[in-house]
Image (cartoon, grey):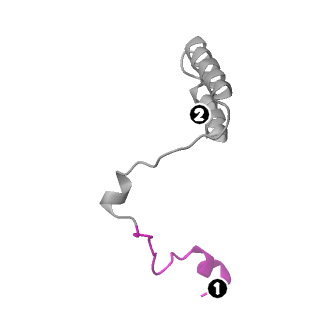
Amino acid sequence: MTENENALTAPQSVTLDTTHTASDLGQRRSVDFDGPRKRLFWLLARNFLLTIVTLGIYRFWAKTRVRKYV
């Protein structure tokens, strides 16, 4: 076999991580916020208004901004 043929062959085995059980997938985690509630309220209000104005397109950025605070 040449060097090029070795590069194109498929791996012999693949190992998958199966440490999660079905019961782990359905559990929710609690989230705590230590900052001032007023700041979080205005963040959520602004995200809500921008999501409505942009017909839902802004929701991706809204999730990211909320995740930074929570």
Q: Secondary structure at mark 1?
A: loop
Q: Residue shown at 65%/21% (left/top)? A: 42
Q: Which residue is mark 2?
A: 63
Left or right: 17 with respect to 61?
Answer: left
Residue placed furthest toward the top: 53
Principal SS element in the magenta part?
Answer: loop
Crowdedness of circle 1 by 10 Å Cα count: few (<14), some, many (20+)? few
Spot occupied by residue 36 in the image (x, y as percentages of width and height): 67, 31
Of residue 62 and residue 12, the one placed in the foreground of this image is 62
Tag in front: 2 or 1: 2
Spot occupied by residue 28 in the image (x, y as percentages of width and height): 41, 48
Q: Residue shown at 67%/36% (left/top)? A: 35
Q: Label 2 amino acid?
A: Lys
Q: Residue shown at 56%/43% (left/top)? A: 32
Which stretch is magenta? 1-19
Q: Label 1 amino acid?
A: Thr
Q: Secondary structure at mark 2?
A: helix
Q: Which residue is mark 1?
A: 2
Say whether marks 2 and 1 touch (CB < 8 Å): no
Q: Is residue 27 above or below residue 6?
A: above
Q: Is residue 30 above or below residue 42?
A: below
Residue 69 appears in which quarter of the rendering?
A: top right
